[in-house]
Amino acid sequence: MTTPTSTETRPAPTPPLTLSRTTATATRVLRQLAHDPRTIALLLVIPCLMLFLLRYVFDGSPRTFDNIGASLLGIFPLITMFLVTSIATLRERTSGTLERLLAMPLGKGDLIAGYALAFGTLAIVQSALATGLALWLLGLDVTGSPWLLLLVALLDALLGTALGLFVSAFAASEFQAVQFMPAVIFPQLLLCGLFTPRDDMHPVLEAISDVLPMSYAVDGMNEVLRHTDMTAAFVRDTLIVAGCALLVLTLGAATLKRRTA
């Protein structure tokens, strides 16, 4: 006598990353941002406005603007992308949108890549506007290629996006998300070499600055400022910034967990 065996049907595992789901997620995020003109203004207008003000703060000393303008061209996009990404992602976490999406056949990789693609698209526009303004309207004088300057600015903006996605997991409100700026951004701003060369700092602070990604963003901008060709140091700096962004995005994907009330 044979005992009938029942065939247990298991759902097929969701692929970690698919192009269609990633682009669908990015499209949804961009549509939401399109209905928020204040966020668009913060992303696209504020960095340009800050560069414009900075240029005329140093109106009597244009060489000073040349020395720090390139560095700030990378720092401003990083800060604004961090703010907008952290707050926008936190809204989706607290509203339950992310939990509902994770209940669907949608991989964590699709979600994090979709958010990165959406904000990365805005980062491209933001970096292009700020770089074009600094070079062709404000007269920022750089020795190297403007395209290399744009590349570093874009990588800095993507790093800000990755940091914003990551810290949104640890905030319970938009106010708390903003509070992460002093902890995540300000130390890097002070130690990145913008105000004084890093090798002039106390050895402990110099060692800390060596592991902060913003330090390499500023170093990369300075390489473009001083050299006509792409240098080995520039390649190293950009790879470090890109690697940090990828690492933080991976950590951000690990924070995407279902939350039940």
Image: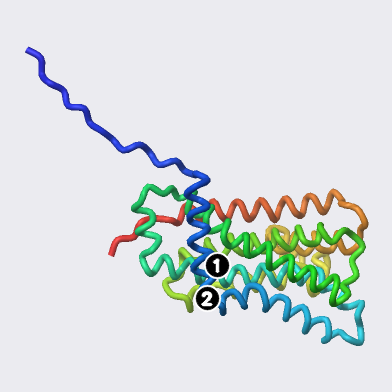
User: In the picture shown, does residue 111 fall above or below 94?
Assistant: above
Q: Could one spot residue 251 in this view of the protein?
A: no
Q: Where is residue 142 in the image (x, y as percent from the top left)?
A: 89, 66
Q: Which residue is drawn at 85% across and 72% down?
A: 136
Q: Where is residue 41 in the image (x, y as percent from the top left)?
A: 62, 77
On the image, the x and y values in percent for residue 16 come to: 47, 43
In the image, taking residue 27 as reference, residue 195 lies left or right, namely right
Above or below: residue 149 compared with residue 189:
above
| Label placed on residue 36 | 2
Q: What numbered label is drawn on residue 85?
A: 1
Which corner quadrant holds the N terminus? top left
Instruction: Describe residue 97's horizontal placement relative to residue 184 as left or right.
Output: left
Mark 1–mark 2 distance (CA, rounded to whole Å): 13 Å
In depth, the one of 25 and 51 nearer the eye is 25
Mark 2: which amino acid? Answer: Asp
Which type of secondary structure does the marked residue at label 2 adopt? loop
